[in-house]
């Protein structure tokens, strides 16, 4: 495999893991490039701060697809407001409440 093939494969893998389209991924990559830190690390930090990924990491869902559905069906409140935008960036002082009960 050439270097280009390896990079393309890794990019496609990240897009599949985080359930993103090319346009969304390009937007996140553009934000990461503008930061002064390492681009790859910054990109992954941005992706981890998305609301649907936070719901997945908090174990409110067993898969990222399920977390995406929980957020899009407005079962998550952030600071007292129902959220349906899966691309919302969760900040440090945000208070999250989910109407979904984990058993």
Image (tube, grey):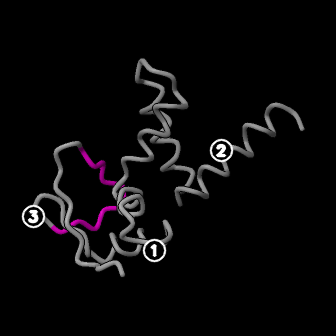
| Mark 1: secondary structure | helix
Report helix, strand or loop for mark 2: helix
Mark 2 or mark 1: name the one nearer the start of the chain: 2
Residue annotated with mark 3? 80
Density class for disc 3 (Cα within 10 Å; few <14, some 14-19, many ≥20) is few
Q: Quadrant of the C terminus?
A: bottom left
**Residue 17: x and y, percent?**
58, 57
Q: Is residue 12 left or right of residue 86?
A: right
Badge 1: how crowded within 10 Å, few (<14), some, or many (20+)? Answer: some
Which label sits in the foreground, 2 or 3? Answer: 3
Query: Residue placed at 61% from the left, 58% from the top?
Result: 16
Check if residue 36 falls in the magenta segment. no
Q: Which residue is drawn at 50% across and 36% down?
A: 29
Task: Single out the residue that lies furthest toward the front.
Answer: 103
* Residue at 52% across, 46% down: 25
The residue lying toward the viewer, choosing from 64 and 24, is 64
Q: In this view, does 59 lie above or below 28?
A: below
Q: Give the range drawn in magenta.
A: 82-91
């Amino acid at each position: 495999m050439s270097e280009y093939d390896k990079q393309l494969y890794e990019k496609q893998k990240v897009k599949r893991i985080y359930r993103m389209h090319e346009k969304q991924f390009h937007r996140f990559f553009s934000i990461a490039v503008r930061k002064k830190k390492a681009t790859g690390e910054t990109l992954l930090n941005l992706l981890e701060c998305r609301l649907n990924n936070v719901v997945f990491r908090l174990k409110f869902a067993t898969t990222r697809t399920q977390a995406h559905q929980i957020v899009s069906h407005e079962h998550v409140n952030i600071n007292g407001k129902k959220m349906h935008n899966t691309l919302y960036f969760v900040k440090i002082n945000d208070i999250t409440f989910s109407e979904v009960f984990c058993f």
